[in-house]
Amino acid sequence: MTEQGIGAAVARREDRRFVTGQGHYTDDINRRGQTHACFVRSPHAHATLNGVDTAAARAMPGVRGIFIGEDMAEVGPLICGWAITDVNGEPHRAPPHPALAIGKVNFVGDAVAVVIADTLEQAKDAAAAVDVDYGILGAVVDPATAAPDGQIQIHETAPGNLSYEWAIGDQAAIDAAFEGAAHVTSLEFTNNRLVPNAMEPRACIAEYEDGTGDYTLYLTSQNPHVHRLVMSAFHGLAPEHKLRVVAPDVGGGFGSKIFIYAEEVVLTWASRHIGRPIKWTAERTESFLTDCHGRDHVTKAELALDGDGKFLAMRVNTIANMGAYLSTFASAVPTYLYATLLAGQYTTGGIYCNVKAVFTNTVPVDAYRGAGRPEAAYVVERLVEAAAAETGRDPAELRKTNFVPTDAFPYETPVIMQYDCGDFAGSMDQALDLAGYSGFQARKAESKAGGKLRGVGFSSYIEACGVAPSAAAGSLGAGVGLWESANIRFNPTGNVQLFTGCHSHGQGHETAYAQIVADKLGVPYEQVDVIHGDSAKVPFGMGTYGSRSAAVGGSAIVKAADKVIEKGRKIAAHALEASEDDIEFAGGNFTVTGTDKAMNIAEVAFTAYVPHNYPEGLEPGLDETAFYDPLNFSFPAGTHICEVEVDPETGSVSIERYAAVDDFGVLINPLIVEGQVHGGIGQGVGQAMLEQAVYDNDGQLISGSYMDYTMPRADDVPNYDVGFNGVPSPLNPLGVKGCGEAGAIAAPAAVMNAVHDALSDVGVGHIEMPATPLRVWQAIQDAAA
Amino acid sequence: MYNFEYRKAGSVDEAAGIVGSDEDAKLLAGGMTYIPTLKQRLASPTTVVDLNGVGGLDGISADGNGVTIGAMVRHAAVAASADVAAAIPALADLASHIGDPQVRNRGTLGGSIANNDPAADYPAALVGLGATVQTNKRAIAADDFFTGLFETALDQDEVVTSVSFPRAGKAAYMKFPNPASRYAIAGVFVAQAADGVRVAVTGAGPCVFRVGEMEAALAANWSADAVAGIGIPADGLNEDIHASAEYRAHLVTVMAKRAVAKAG
Ligand SMILES: Cc1cc2nc3c(=O)[nH]c(=O)nc-3n(C[C@H](O)[C@H](O)[C@H](O)COP(=O)(O)OP(=O)(O)OC[C@H]3O[C@@H](n4cnc5c(N)ncnc54)[C@H](O)[C@@H]3O)c2cc1C
């Protein structure tokens, strides 16, 4: 490890501009002649559009144009890019999702028209004057009752409000395994619906240049090239070479900025019609109403154990709420990103999972930090903890009894995953230590003396990261490949620009990627700049989500660095008058084996651009691009242990201790990794105790502002005890696994297991997330009654 | 925001004159409630009259009877005031738990009580201590000032100038915060006030109210136990996704008990 290479806790270089207010976000950009868009949105969850009268609005000052769905029918509906095949071998039902509604609106916030005017105030005034005649229909809100016959139908092409019924595993074999079980644990619960709440709301500016026919779209995107591809290939807005997508600084995404939304499609299309750049920035209310939400499952889960506590089989039935339409990657979340993780860290004999994906009159649901894996970890870890309690076993011991042993890797799970490596028991032992588990009973007694209930909860999660091997993803229905690109460009003076297809929106790539380049090429860290987020600058790339940026994007960087070294070797051999085979590369220097003849990589770069004395036939320049397609997912795993104290008088829960031991393989920058763990746990605590998107029966979002939607605050979380037990992944050149989502995946189960443990003392058997004071107090009352 | 005329008032009388002659004109204090209202286009005033330039509304003074706090005094200033801490520490403590630092640095006593949000903290202090609201026209006893949900006794041409809080014996405020907004789900101010024991409840109902039964019990026996068994009816209390009426009723008793314990 060099001082600022792989493994060094380098402070994030991007933080200087972020914390001093010098970040450069989409809304900070203003283009000459820029106009402003305001969307007319449905106030109803479900209604027919009987007429949209824009005449009065058109006559208002500053208005440049007003468009409704029919005006842009040529653009085609928003797509879902992952095709699920249902239990009958049929493709999922993905009813048309026009960017501006045609004929019908299906959720509160569904865009009906766009008003474009010289100022935002004028656009808002005119939008208020658009007269929409709605024929209000009954709304379908509760996913649990969305599908049965007789319900209100949302889409003609999705009978029973069902997008698909999908299953994995051999149902008959699993049912048989349950027959012979010594004990069956059975739970029913919901995985609460969350609003992503990135600090920066979604925004875009679309600009069309008549002189060249070029479009530029500035956008809050996690994957600018994916946006460009979809808008070009599926919406025909512009050919790819005529559409530039720029995602500048992006203030958080958590998945919500992966997707192709109505607003950017409408603005790009309209910019040509208006002949002016158009800007739109979501107001916070719009973010609540229209950003894709996360989670929202209703699940019945069962675990069968034999007399020794071995897990024989698992059976899971889930209803997944898709919202009103299938968003970009929505269909993959409750299937391949969920059911394939139900083995957890265990050798469970067999698993069957059935998923019904239903439509409701709510905003679409799609990937949100963890995407399917938090839901899976919650199923598995709640089941295991409940099984331990029911059979009188220590939860740590029961887990150890069932862990995949370290010598069993690579390990094939019953749900099509192949785990590469891991040390589950080692992480558990380290976590028990870090959590001071042996002192728990004493702390519990102390709490009791103070009138409080104390509980401890475990979460031994696993996740699949490094999304994703393209062929495997393709065979499961993905519409794209999931490789990544990197371009390392030396300048003649020896400094380096790294162009990556990944995108940083809080992850710290500008620091971590520079560390990888510095480490691999021996260039000083300060002399490496990382460029991302502009389709006109970076090679085609798939973007950042699914904790892929280190395992896939980082591996592409290593491959590009290898190419640089290979070419450099030729240049150095020539200059040093040695055979290529005798050139060694280390620490930035090409040396001739067994001599003190050496040439620094900066000199090699200079020679490449000023090739006066240069190998014959070799191209000038030192500029190498690599594409990396992963061999498999990576499997970060670990054990988190949470300790809570409950005030039974008020129902308040406070997290007293939280220990996390994670295996992320090799850490590129432990400081950044710890930060990701902290943030992830914070979001997981939010899901477990605070956050919930609540729709009323009419489909109105009740928790539609920060007055009612509880975001985790600093004083809601404890100081975390974080440890690492890294087992390098053998499947990628960095040995990394991915850390961006782990906290959010592990924490909900750890917290809720602790809450259940505490409340078991007063006879409470079940409580749903979020465990708010009201819920906890009510559960205690009900148990006492 | 809709367009409106902005006027920076130079005096209380000027401000009162403008709002008195135009029922669509509105006063602006710290803007913590009113600016978001404007931004969301929930109000379209003709004129917004800014009180921030008006002299004499931002002082805190203490004497043997109590403390008088100007209408434009920020929550942070009350929380940090040595005079308030010396005269009525419970009041400084209450102010220190309003909102977050930004809100405490902008939000004002006058704006808070004029708005009379059912979940605001100050109304509990005013009623719990038997304070007097001073306006440009008259003095109004706290018991008469808060008249209903977002309703006060203020006339259209009336500007709050200050509030006088009489010294109390033992006093304390306990609130159970709404987890999202951190306003009070139930907040209880208990005090051995100048005119006897007072128990004022905010957050639980549509408007701050007193609990006579608790006041009587505490007058006889100032101890947490004295109120522990006194419940209030859930009928008519607020209900939302954070708390049922029953839960609020329960919390009133718990907060009352804890407030008495905190008061010592
Ligand atoms: C995020 C947030 C959290 C908050 N949390 C809490 C909390 O925990 N507890 C709590 O009690 N409060 C809370 N508040 C409210 C805050 O404390 C302010 O006191 C309240 O918003 C009033 O704001 P203001 O003083 O800036 O008045 P403004 O918003 O400027 O005015 C409010 C109203 O009062 C009128 N008004 C203002 N001054 C006068 C006057 N002198 N005479 C007559 N009428 C007047 C105005 O016309 C307007 O109608 C919170 C507010 C926010 C934004």
Image: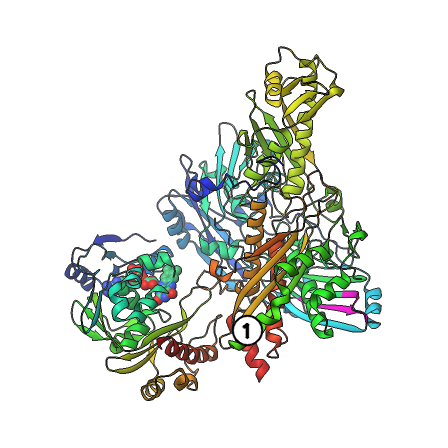
Q: Chain of mark 1?
A: A
Q: Position of residue A607 (x, y in %)?
A: 61, 16
The question of residue A304 being in magenta is answered with yes
Indicate left or right for A611 with A412 as reference.
left
Note whether residue B155 is visible.
no
Quadrant of residue A388 in the image? Answer: bottom right
Q: Nearer the viewer, residue A475 or A252?
A: A252
**Image quarter hosting the C terminus of chain B:** bottom left
Say left or right for B104 vs A697: left
Q: How far across and down, in percent of the image, does residue B98 sit? A: 36, 64
- In the picture, measured across the screen, residue A140 lies left or right of residue B244, that is right
Query: Magenta includes A656?
Result: no
**Amino acid bearing label 1:** Glu
Residue A509 drawn at (x, y percent)? 57, 40
Q: Nearer the viewer, residue A543 or B65?
A: B65
Q: Which residue is mark 1?
A: A446
Q: Give the colour scheme of this rendering.
A: rainbow
Residue A354 occupies which quadrant of the picture?
A: bottom right
| Residue A18 in view of the camera | yes
Left or right: A122 as drawn, with respect to A461: left
| Magenta region, residue range | A299-314
Tell me the residue at 69%/72% (across/down): A389
User: Vertical placement of A597 versus A269: above or below?
Assistant: above
**Vertically, is A733 above or below B106?**
above
In the image, residue A590 above or below residue B193: above
